[in-house]
Image (cartoon, rainbow, N blue to C red):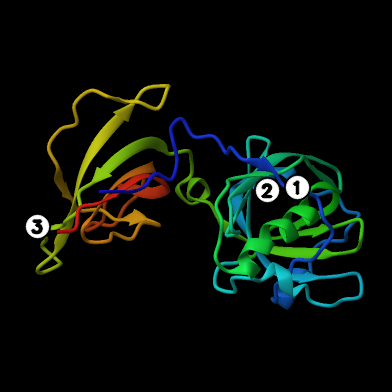
């Protein structure tokens, strides 16, 4: 039985414009707030290299903006790529255009997917984030082992983010985009270092430029690698969009390829 279809291909962040609103976004890591001076030119090239996770958020009076921390274990995350700003770990995925000039970041009108969330705080998070990110913001960045991004709104709200390197940064270049169908059940597979290993059963699938499957997929094969960001649920078949990277100088017992989940395209329950 089909359980959900998270996205039709080709992917587009479709949705409705986010209503503008003034509010707050919190986070609580003091070190993240100690970024470069607000009037210093930001390093625009640094932004696409990291996933930026909200660490602290305060208003003009220095009070923490609690509404921005609806999910303490999943902080609001910003991603910058090809002139697009993406917002994750909100109720809906949000996105829009952005430009950086000197110490200023300008974000266009955000659009979002149309999913309802049962938690009212999480549902309100979209608006709280949107009203602070749209428009012109002061921006500051610091590089190094613990990079930071600081955004300051016209109302004086200060949002501080810490950077976690993207897969492209970690693996030293872009990955190859592939679609993998993962069977509902794993199967035993031999592994010299892991007794009783269970392998995912995987086969590659192809789509045309209209998002329609093409050709006949081959047989399912043992998949010995891991897919970063993916947790398999027994009895559920998935089609995944992943990025495949070449691992430079892998360890003797390691794989020369790394797979990172981009999104679950299709999911169907096959539980008996």
Q: Residues within 10 Å of mark 1 (few under 14, many from 20)?
A: some
Asked if residue 77 is positioned above or below residue 207 in the image, the reply reads below
* Residue named by callout 2: 46
Point out the frontmost of discs 1 and 3.
Answer: 3
3D distance between C-alphas at marks 2 and 1? 5 Å
Q: Which mark is residue 5?
A: none
237 sits left or right of 219 in the view:
right
Q: Secondary structure at mark 2?
A: helix
226 sits left or right of 130 in the view:
left
3D distance between C-alphas at marks 1 and 3? 47 Å
64 sits left or right of 264 in the view:
right
Q: Residues within 10 Å of mark 2 (few under 14, many from 20)?
A: some
Q: Tell me the quadrant of the picture where the C terminus can be found.
A: bottom left
Please report the residue visible at 58 percent of the width from the left and 69 percent of the height from the top: 119
Q: Residues within 10 Å of mark 3 (few under 14, many from 20)?
A: some
Sequence-wise, the earlier of marks 1 and 3 is: 1
Asked if residue 109 is positioned above or below residue 165 in the image, the reply reads above
Q: Secondary structure at mark 3?
A: loop
* Residue named by callout 1: 43
Point out the frontmost of discs 2 and 3.
Answer: 3
Number of numbered tags placed on the structure image:
3
Please report the residue visible at 55 percent of the width from the left and 73 percent of the height from the top: 73
Using the image as rendered, state which of residue 189 and residue 45 is in the foreground: 189
Please report the residue visible at 13 percent of the width from the left and 64 percent of the height from the top: 197
3D distance between C-alphas at marks 2 and 3? 42 Å
Q: Which mark is residue 189?
A: 3
Is the residue under label 1 in contact with that under label 2 (CB below 8 Å)?
Answer: yes
Please report the residue visible at 92 percent of the width from the left and 60 percent of the height from the top: 155
Q: Quadrant of residue 45?
A: top right
Q: Secondary structure at mark 1?
A: loop
């Amino acid at each position: 039985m089909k359980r959900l279809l998270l996205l039709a291909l080709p992917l587009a962040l479709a949705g409705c414009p986010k209503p503008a609103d003034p509010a707050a976004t919190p986070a609580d890591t003091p070190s993240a707030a100690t970024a470069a001076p607000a009037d210093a030119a930001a390093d625009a090239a640094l932004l696409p290299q990291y996933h930026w996770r909200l660490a602290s958020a305060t208003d003009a009076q220095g009070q923490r903006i609690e509404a921005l921390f609806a999910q303490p274990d999943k902080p609001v995350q910003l991603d910058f790529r090809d002139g697009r700003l993406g917002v994750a770990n909100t109720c809906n995925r949000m996105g829009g255009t952005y430009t950086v000039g000197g110490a200023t970041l300008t974000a266009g009108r955000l659009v979002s997917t149309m999913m309802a969330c049962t938690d009212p705080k999480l549902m309100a998070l979209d608006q709280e984030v949107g009203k602070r990110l749209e428009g012109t913001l002061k921006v500051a960045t610091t590089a190094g082992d613990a990079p930071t991004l600081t955004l300051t709104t016209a109302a004086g709200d200060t949002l501080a983010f810490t950077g976690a390197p993207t897969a492209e940064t970690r693996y030293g270049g872009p990955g190859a985009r592939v679609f993998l169908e993962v069977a509902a059940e794993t199967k035993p597979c031999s592994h010299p270092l892991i007794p009783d290993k269970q392998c995912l059963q995987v086969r590659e699938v192809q789509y045309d430029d209209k998002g329609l499957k093409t050709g006949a997929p081959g047989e399912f094969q043992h998949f010995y690698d891991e897919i970063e960001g993916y947790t398999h649920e027994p009895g559920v078949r998935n089609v995944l969009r992943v990025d495949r990277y070449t691992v430079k100088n892998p360890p003797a017992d390691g794989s020369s390829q790394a797979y990172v989940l981009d999104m679950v395209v299709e999911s169907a329950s096959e539980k008996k």
